[in-house]
Image: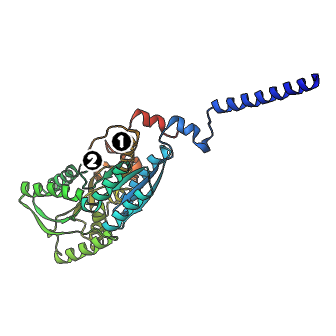
Amino acid sequence: MATWKKSAMLVLVLVLSIAMVACGAKTQPSTDASNGGEAAANNPLAGKKIALIMQINLGTFSAQYIEGVKEQVQKLGGTVTVNPAEGDLAKMASNLDAAINQKVDGILIDHGTAEALEAGVKRALEKKIPVVAFDADLKVPGVTVLEQGDQKMAEQTLEQLAKDIGGKGNIVKIWVAGFAPMERRQIAYKAFQAKYPDIKEVAAFGAATQNTALDTQAQMEAILKKYPNKGDITAVWAAWDEFAKGAARAIQQAGRTEIKIYGIDMSDEDLQMIQDTKTSWVASAAVDPKDIGRIQVRYLYQKMHGDETPEKVVLEPVFVSRDQLPKEQISTADLSKHVKGWGGSEQGYTDWMKKAEVK
């Protein structure tokens, strides 16, 4: 009997020990990165799946914008899928629907029209998927829309153009309808025409294609043949950097570098051309494309966090001219050393977001 009691006591002690170990394991917080322990402790939004729905992914501006999006999403512990539509609005709407059906946690939209996107955006909101758009003509309650201050960018470049040519001369406008930022830039252009009646528009063209710069170059070459003499064209105003690149190449090849180009937007490739004294592109107004991507992501994460966000966010552009830049080639990463206000924007940052970022 004594032996039986002793054995029973040993079993009881063993069971209690196992139970205590088990309870202790449950109260110990996990710090294993593989199960999101440490990340979740600092960032309740870690692991979110983000979809970027783009109307068109073209040129170095788009590439740097995507870099900014990816950088900020990754810092916040998420993943992003890029869905370009090659300019096809029907495909863009389909990509939006697909992202909703895949139950992503948040949606970023780059350009597009209300007609193509509004139904899908409303469906996303019904599914509790937040949406933040850039340069899209959307007016859906609950959606935050970013824009670059397009009228100001147009005003900055057009005023410099007018100043440089003494308020008179013949110009070519390269612009395309059907994009919200272009329509806003056109408002400034019409005001410019009224202000400077001695500046005459002798040609206007532009189309957004998968080969915009190349197509623009061919069209500009034709215009240069139509106006072959020095003084026939004084300057070119290009409402998009892809237009400016094409025009600059046509003018350089034709040896007509007396014709100066004033553009909008800025990427590393654009900056190289502006710094090159052999090209005609002398100035541009822009917002850092990486900053645009970063800021857009920040407002999306604010929404996922439950923060109040404005319906419209206007990004402040800066004017960049050749005479501000050094002779040695630089990238947009170095541009802030020479142009005040370029890059490094903290717009959209919150204290909780800074703490949540992966260091």
* Dot 1: element: loop
- The picture places residue 149, in percent across and down from the top left corner, at 24, 48
- The picture places residue 248, in percent across and down from the top left corner, at 29, 66
Q: How many marks?
A: 2
Is residue 256 visible from the viewing direction of this image? yes
Q: Return the mark for residue 317.
A: 2
Alpha carbon separation for disc pair 1 and 2 = 11 Å
**Which residue is most to the front?**
1
The quarter of the displayed image where residue 189 is located: bottom left
Amino acid, disc 2? Pro
What is the crowding at mark 1: few (fewer than 14 residues within 10 Å), some, or many (at least 20)? Answer: some
Residue 57 or residue 285, whichever sits in front: 57
Q: Is residue 173 above or below residue 34?
A: below
- The picture places residue 315, in percent across and down from the top left corner, at 28, 45
Q: Residue at x 48, y 37 (%)?
A: 356
Residue 74 or residue 263, whichever sits in front: 74
Amino acid, disc 1? Ser
What is the crowding at mark 2: few (fewer than 14 residues within 10 Å), some, or many (at least 20)? Answer: many
Q: Residue at x 36, y 41 (%)?
A: 345
**Of callouts 1 and 2, which one flags the residue occurring earlier in the amino acid sequence?**
2
* Dot 2: element: loop
Q: Residue at x 41, y 32 (%)?
A: 351
Is residue 87 visible from the viewing direction of this image? no
Tell me the quarter of the image containing the N terminus.
top right
Residue 348 or residue 232, whichever sits in front: 348
- Say which residue label 1 marks: 345
Residue 325 or residue 175, whichever sits in front: 175
